[in-house]
Image (tube, rainbow, N blue to C red):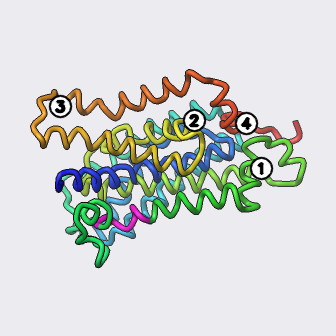
Amino acid sequence: MESYALLIGATLSAGTVLAIAALGLLINEKAGIVNLGAEGMMLCAAIAGFATVVHTGNTWLGFAAGMAAGAVLAALFGVLVIWLNTNQYATGLALSLFGVGFSAFAGISYVQAKLPETPKYAIPGLADLPLVGPALFRQHPLVYLTMALAAVLIWFLYRSRAGLVLRSVGESPESAHALGYPVRRIRLAAVVVGGALCGLAGAYISTVYTPLWVEGMVAGRGWIALALTTFATWRPARVLLGAYLFGGVTMLQFHLQATGVQVASQLLSMLPYVATIVVLALISRNPAWIRINMPASLGKPFYPGS
């Protein structure tokens, strides 16, 4: 029973990384912008957060540094695709490649660095409950904040006027512009917020989830988070559930190895990525369903006055 509690707890922690990044990318895509640079932003944020914690000893300052790094890179991406109308897909790929190279260069001197010991978190009175205590109530506070973020985002998108405006910019930017809304500035704000959340996910990886710095340590999670938005049909609650699903698949490989299951480690390491491909293939069997849920102007440039 204890092993299952540990598996559930590890699933929540692993899923949190994907959930934060995917919720950020969801905000981008609700505004009509596709950012393929999530992997690069997360890597730059990971080294920014790790270096900050090394020098300050404060994990929350590391989170702030990661969010700042992600926001700056996202703002650069936003200026290029929103004001200069560069191709969103090519620009995102370039940002991802830049992030991979820059983080490797910036992190050379931090490869052997060690972080201060992370404090153990537990909710008094609940953490000692059998099974559910170790599984649910001994998590880092950011795990619970991520769940709250999903709830706030649901309210924002579907219950607030600002969320309605954001969705209108993603569905029909021309109509929003005709009503007097600053489409480009709204899109840039959405991109920056999404980048900050991707940065938070990257900093969480290097400071809490795997408290060390290794080149390329994000290991494709940015791409999985991008796929999650489609998997969830652009719904925050489904993003959260999908993130925990993929987090569970990721942790399953370690659980199977610990229980002595004789399966090649390379095959187990493939599980999260194979699961991503399988899910996207299944969803793609019904293109009409995707079109119904996908923001109408996703990936398309906006030309004021056109």
- Image quadrant holding the C terminus, namely top right
Magenta segment range?
138-144
Query: Among all residues in the image, which is located at the extreme bottom?
Result: 124
Instruction: Residue 45 in the image: state x and y as whole percent.
Output: 41, 53
Please state which of the two labelled residues, at mark 3 or mark 1, is closer to the viewer: 3
Is 182 within the magenta? Answer: no
Q: CA distance from mark 4 to mark 2?
A: 17 Å
Question: Under tag 3, what secondary structure?
Answer: helix
Q: Nearer the viewer, residue 145 or 108?
A: 145
Q: Residues at badges 2 and 1 in contact (C-beta under 8 Å)?
A: no
Read off the residue under disc 3.
265
Work out whether 46 lies above or below 65. above
Dot placed on the residue nearer the N-terminal end, 4 or 2 = 2
Q: CA distance from mark 3 to mark 4?
A: 42 Å
Q: Residues within 10 Å of mark 3 (few under 14, many from 20)?
A: few
- Image quadrant holding the N terminus, namely bottom left
Read off the residue under disc 2.
91
Dot placed on the residue nearer the N-terminal end, 2 or 3 = 2
Please state which of the two labelled residues, at mark 2 or mark 1, is closer to the viewer: 1
Seen at 37% across and 65% down, the residue is 62
Q: Which mark is residue 297?
A: 4
Please state which of the two labelled residues, at mark 3 or mark 4, is closer to the viewer: 3
Q: Residues at badges 3 and 4 in contact (C-beta under 8 Å)?
A: no
Seen at 90% across and 47% down, the residue is 178
Read off the residue under disc 1.
183
Work out whether 90 lies above or below 150. above
Q: CA distance from mark 3 to mark 1?
A: 48 Å
Instruction: Residue 72 in the image: state x and y as whole percent.
Output: 53, 55
Q: CA distance from mark 2 to mark 1?
A: 20 Å
The residue type indicated by label 4 comes to Ser
The residue type indicated by label 2 comes to Thr
Q: CA distance from mark 2 to mark 3?
A: 35 Å
